[in-house]
Amino acid sequence: MSFDTPGELTALPSDLFPGAGFGVDTNPDGPPEGDRWSTWDVALHGPKPRPDWVITALAAVDADLGVLKTGKEADVHVVRRWVPGTDESITLAAKRYRSHDHRMFHRDAGYLEGRRVRRSREMRAMARRTSFGKEVISQQWAFAEFGALGKLWALGLPVPYPVQLTDEELLMEFVGTGVEAAPRLAQARPAPDLLADLFEQCRDAMATLAAEGWAHGDLSPYNVLLHGERLVIIDWPQIVDVVGNPHGADFLQRDVHNMCRWFTSRGLEVDEEAMFGDLMACVYSRW
């Protein structure tokens, strides 16, 4: 499996691990604790070097602690993974995308213009929005986000580490303390003397992304978390190839506008036009 661009698919999740996913248990008696055995052995794994906190033991078990966030495309749950009888325990965020029967597809078209799959049958089905094509799109969102997070993590961008992917869910680093999630930037009230540093963190992340030719595509204070004094950017399934997508520059400009508007509303003077120009220069510096 590889991604030549953030949205190029060489295989679909169902091809890689049919039958894998939350609630699928190869032991009919179930684990002695938790809701299921760890699905590590039937999943795609995040990039190496892997953080020390990731639990890979097949003897581990998972328990769903409840819903953290609901959305039109996916719900995010809090999952605890631990090895019974040991001190090994971690909290993860589990993003579970809705099936094509329960998704809103009106927002997909613009993002998908820059994406490709290498099978013409799937491309045609996606374009025609057939039932099969919608299922391909649903799977592609999860697969695209997993691939993007892996690349962004490797670049050192402030994103959650993608632990694993099955055909049912994306398990990733939980950003927060204990089981309390870090607040979204939109809901946070950072001290005024922290605003300039947070803006620089935001600009640096967007510049690193632009230097790779990408834009988040749906960036706003609602998908940026404030963990202590550090920004963490989430929700990456729609990541955009700025050059390959005919609307790429528009997506980037919207990202810039959304973030600059928030900082301006908090009293920090920023130059939105100059920032967009700088980021576009980063995009084309690759050529």
Image: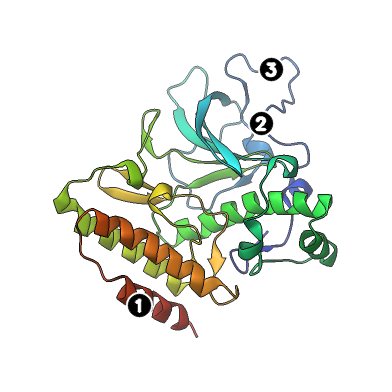
The residue identified by callout 2 is 22
Q: Give the Cα separation between the discs numbered 2 and 1.
A: 43 Å
Amino acid type at image mark 1: Asp
Of residues 106 and 46, the one nearer the viewer is 106
Decide: is 18 above or below 233: above
How many numbered badges does the structure rendering display?
Answer: 3
- Give the quarter of the image for residue 28: top right
Task: Say which residue label 1 marks.
Answer: 278
Q: Amino acid at mark 2?
A: Phe
Q: Secondary structure at mark 2?
A: loop
**Residue tagged 3:** 30
> Along the line of sight, which residue is nearer the eye, 278 or 268?
268
Q: Residue at x 61, y 30 (%)?
A: 38
- Report the amino acid beneath label 3: Gly
Label 1 – label 3 distance at C-alpha: 55 Å
- Measured as percent of width and height from the top left, residue 128 is found at 81, 61
Q: Give the structural element (helix, strand or loop) at label 1.
A: helix
Packing grade of label 3 (10 A; few <14, some 14-19, many >=20) is: some
Query: Which of the image's four quarters has the N terminus?
Result: bottom right
